[in-house]
Every structure is written in C-alpha cells, then in structure tokens.
Amino acid sequence: MEIKVFKFGGASVNSVSGVRNVVSILKKYNSSDILVVISAMGKTTNALEELLGYYMSGDAVSVVECYYRIYNFHFDIIHELFPANDHPVYQHVEALFTQLQGHLRRGHLTPGRPLIYDFEYDQIVCYGELVSTAIVNHFLNESGISSMLFDARDLIKTNSTYRDAKVDWRITQANIKRVIQKYFLSNDKTRRVAVTQGFIGSDRENNSTTLGRESSDYTAAIFAYALRTKEVTIWKDVPGILNADPKWFKNTKKLSKLSYREAIELAYFGASVIHPKTIKPLENAKIILKVKSFLQPQMKGTSVENLKEWSLHSPIYILKKNQVLLSISPKDFSFIVEENLSQIFDILAKHRVKVNVMQNSAISFSVCVDANRLQDNQCIASLQENYTVRYNDNLELYTIRHYNKGAINRIIKNRKVLLEQKTRSTVHLILK
C-alpha cells in the first residue's frame, strides 16, 4: 500500500479556482492513496484572530460584523462550487458556523467564566480549518474522487499549552494507525483520499488546541511519520525552496535539493517555506520532503532528504521584519553571569518570547525578538523589576547561510548595523 501525504496551504484554497486546482492536482495521482492536509482558506486565520480580538474586548457589534464577513466569504465560494442549494455541504458548513456562533455567545454569558486569551484563541481559530476541509472534501466527492473527512482533533492529541500545544506522540501515532490505516486498508480496492485539518489537535478534555502559527506543515509531518510514508509533499505558491524570499529579494534561485540539517537550520532561522517543527519527524523516519508549486505542479520543486554530501553555490538569505533588540543590564552594574541569564530566560519563557539572536558583554545581555511577542509589554515589565531594559524597535534581522563578503555587503549597504554575529556558516545582521 502506497500512501502519499499532501499539504495544501491557505493560498492554494483561497478561491473557487484554487479549490478546483487542488482537485485537478489530486486527479493526476490516481494510482495512489492520498492523505490531504488542508489549511484555512486564504486569510481566514487572520480574520478569526480579528474576531477573537473583538470577542475578548466585548465589542459585540464588531464581533457580529466580523463573523458575517468570514461567513459570507466561505458561502460565496460554496455557492459557486455547489450550485444546487440542497447539497449536503450547505448543512455541514452551516452547522460549523452555528457551533462557532454558540461559543461566541456562551463566552460572555456564562457567570464567573474568565476569558483566557490563549484558550479562546484555539477554540475560535480552529474553525478556519474545519470549514475549509469540509468544503474541499465535499468538492472532491462531487468531482468523482472518493474522499472521507477526518477531524484532526480526534487523531492528534496534545497537552493543554494552548496556541503552542505539544504532541503526545504515543497516543497520536496509535490513533492515526488505528483510524487512517484502517480506512486505506479497507476491502474496497478503489483509490481513496482522506482529508484532514492542519494546525489543530485536542487535549485530554477534548478542547481544541493549535500547534503554533503556520504549523500545517508540521501536521503533515506527524501523519507521514505515523504512517511511515516514503515522502510528504507541501504544495506552495513558489516553485520550491528558494535561496531568498522573492517578496524581498530579486533574482532568487531555486534549490533543487537540501539536506535535513540545512532545512532545519533554515526553518529555525525563519525561512517561511517550512515550519520549524516539520523536519525532525521526517528525518527520524527518513521520509523525503518535497516542496512543489500548486501553480506549476509539473515542475520538480525541491527535495529535502538524507544527503551525506551536499554543496551550495549561492548564499541563502532569510529576512525577519518588525524586530526588537532588547539590551538588558543589572541595575547594580554587576556582571552578567549564569544566575542572571537563568533568570532572564525564565522570564522570556514565561511570556513565550522566542529569542532569534542573543549576545552578551560583561554587563549587558542583548536579545532580538519578534515585536508581536512584546505587544502587551508584560515581559519587559517583568524584566525591569531587576534589570535596566533599553530597546530599539522597527528593526530587520537578516540571516545569511553560507555567506561571503559580497553577500554581507549587499545587505548592509547604506544601512546602520546594530549587531553582527558570525559563525563559520551563518551571519546574523540586525539593521536599522
């Protein structure tokens, strides 16, 4: 039995033509059973985050307006894909929106029920994936492809760290083997497709959880690992993994192959093509990762695999915008020592602030972080109890893998360099 795992992101299903294109791609693989991981349509996750903000603030009017913008976006797509108003998809998706509406109403009407942002985030934002997969699954069957929808929350079990849940691999693997393998191994010999959601799971109390922003790639890796497939394909709007993001750099080059280690490094430093958690499960099971274009599915794309020897002829550029550089110093001007570092990292971890770059001197410790992690300033307030904290914002962090002098000069020309950090193969540049 050959099972392929495909992941389609929000850009691939953001319109009627996008959904039809996904179906046309799946039809090209008519000799394989396929598990398809689908993200929320287009910018639905952003819209649901906006809805969550209104909900948390108690802005009932904006909640209703935002809810119906999301509702109408999806039903406009449904009306064009399914002209018959009595098609089961209408009842299915309507039921999901009714569930979402019920949660929004209960939140502020339940006496003594505190609203905790991270928990509410996962209960609300998960509907983007639930709705998109319902639509795609119905359209697959409408198009003659035998498909069944599986709720990822029944399969991927996690802890209760909402918005960044950790997978319980033992239970999750057992669930996937019991449910998904049984589906593909049924006596029906026709080719089968299984559809499920990226990004989401559930905890022991069956509350929805999410695995981290943009983590549908990781979901695909979880299923591939549990099913021990030969490969997993992530379908993007780019021809493969490039040596730079074409939104910010001209004359980018496609990388035909990458080693697992290089892909892990790129994802860790912020390359947007692959989610950082994706590679390790695939490496452990020696599963090949392919990154291909859903706009040009005939192209080869990029292959990430176990390469013992691999060379690169061009530097790889990674840009993270909207950065903040914090400079943290003890108030008594004592040296920065292990005890200080331990305390600082405890505070950063408590507020779930990820450090992108760090550097220390005798009396100062500097960290570069994403600005959106500091929006409520609680982390800075906690640091200021024992430390003097200075910061520069609106910065850009450039990471160059396999750099040379020309690559560095290309980035720093006419820019102010606030921090430069080099290793043998990587340079970090924080620029104003």
Image (cartoon, grey):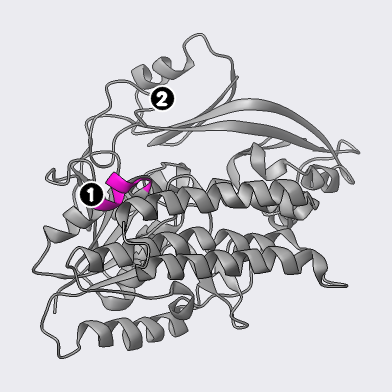
Q: Can you give x and y, in whole percent of width and height, for residue 76 in the image?
A: 42, 49
Decide if residue 182 is in sight here: yes
Q: Which residues are magenta?
A: 14-21
Residue 280 image-quadrant placement:
bottom left
Sequence-wise, the earlier of marks 2 and 1 is 1
- Residue at point 76%, 66% (across, down): 107
Horizontal relation, residue 118 to residue 48: left or right: right
Which residue type does callout 2 highlight? Trp
Give the class, few, some or many, for how many residues have Cα within 10 Å of label 1's Cα (few <14, many ≥20). Answer: some
- Residue at point 73%, 41% (across, down): 375
Residue at mark 2 to residue at mark 1: CA–CA distance? 27 Å
Residue under label 2: 248
Q: Residue furthest front?
A: 85
Residue under label 1: 21
| Above or below for 363 versus 132 | above
Residue 310 image-quadrant placement:
top left
Horizontal relation, residue 226 to residue 68: left or right: left
On whether residue 324 falls in the magenta region, the answer is: no
